[in-house]
Image (cartoon, grey):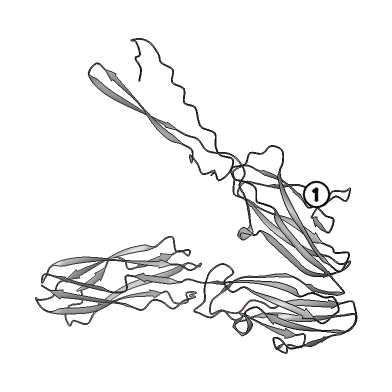
Amino acid sequence: MGMIPAGQTQLVTVTPLPIPASGGSVATDYYGAAITVSATIGATMQSYPIQLHQTAQGVILALAQGATAYDFGGVPVGESAEYQLSITNNGNMPAQLGLATATSYFVVADALPDGGTSAPPLVIGPGQPGAAQITFTPTMVQNYTDNLVFNNLAGVPLCAALPSMFSLKGAGTTGVSVTPTDIKFGNVQCNQSPATPVTVQIKNTGAAAHFIPTLGQGTNSYFTLQDSTGTTLVLGNMYPLPQASTVSISVVPKAVVSPATTANDGLADTLAITTDAMGDMQHTVALHETAQGAVLTLTPMTVTTSVAAGQTTFANFTVNNTGNYNVDFTVTTSTNAPGTPNTFTSNLMGGTLSGGGNMPQSGELSIIGPPQGVQYTGWLTLAAASGSILCQDVPPRMPLSVTGQ
């Protein structure tokens, strides 16, 4: 509080607090504020609001699905396996990211010409994805570990801490390799054609051996395995792996039938290949698949009310889509009381529900009271448009009941 003499000016300095270097946000005006200057002129108090605008600028890096480690599994000595690490810049400034490993067994893509293990700056634009290619090359039959270290280059400001070290491991094996080690079948629509099979190659550069295929989900898996002739492989059975040969097997996705979860990677599994080759270790292949479709919900489950004869009462209801695919819908009402078709009416007749569960639509039921002591019943029915992609059955119709007072 202060006094400003007539005809004078008082300077007020607004000093912003430092924007945190971690756990921050680059949302517009996230660090904005409002102040009010109040002044008494004569006997009148006047207020002057002032809006302060401030948005953080910087980089916020995130690894795909919160990844913290990757296991290359067994790789034959002298051969290589690759992994692509997805990195997204959720900030509003370009990121210049330095990547480094401590050993020469794990090399980041675009290695320096001098043979070092550091990659040149990985530049990722604001709101854009990027990727680092990591290659594992064992030289002996043993286990290997390393860490991928992230460095912020060129003084680009950070609005969130860089990802912690990304752990890497793998093992050198005696002549057996399995490729690929990561298969993405993507989004597959429920009750439609299954995804295209993918071939997995088991290469044996050593003596004759055998291999045993298994799936982490066993017989509950969303995948089956076939040999090169199309014959289904029995999980857990032993199959020949001849000397100096490559055996191909197919990972065959099953059709995704409802009910099915639409969670990201909700149909994922792991293919494991175990051999009896001396010194070999288990080989794993990550299988990724997500069911795509709508999942409709209707709340509440029932509406029961009472109202004076001839009067109108109201009840709210909500429809939502917690799946990952848009759907068109209709809402209808009916009653079993003869000659009273308008006992239950809805102001929401239909529309489109976006996937994700965060854009529900609400409706209001108008309910007319029957004669005193008489009960009318009816139904509210939620239906999906013909041909809709659904991963769950449409909710059962909602029972409605009103008693006259």
In the figure, is residue 182 to the left or right of 112? left
Q: Quadrant of the C terminus?
A: bottom left
Q: How many numbered callouts?
A: 1
Q: Nearer the viewer, residue 5 or 327?
A: 5
Residue name at image x 18 percent, y 79 percent: 376
Q: Nearer the viewer, residue 392 or 382?
A: 392
> Height in image: 126 above or below 292?
above
Image location of residue 61, percent across then percent down: 63, 49
Image location of residue 268, percent across then percent down: 62, 73
Image quadrant in which you'd find residue 153: top right
In the figure, is residue 121 to the left or right of 357? right
Image quadrant in which you'd find residue 265: bottom right
> Height in image: 134 above or below 121?
below
In the figure, is residue 177 to the left or right of 326? right
Q: Nearer the viewer, residue 286 or 140?
A: 140
In the figure, is residue 237 to the left or right of 356? right
Image location of residue 202, percent across then percent down: 80, 78
> Height in image: 298 above or below 226?
above
Near mark 1 (Cα within 10 A), the count class, few <14, some 14-19 or many ≥20, is: many
Image quadrant in which you'd find residue 367: bottom left
Label 1: which residue? Answer: 118
- From which residue to which does the magenta span run? 193-197
Residue name at image x 15 percent, y 75 percent: 403
Residue 196 belongs to magenta span: yes
Q: Of helix, strand and loop, which one carries label 1? A: strand
Image location of residue 232, percent across then percent down: 70, 88
Q: The disc labelled 1 sits on which kind of residue?
A: Ser
> Height in image: 110 above or below 378?
above
Residue name at image x 36 percent, y 63 percent: 361
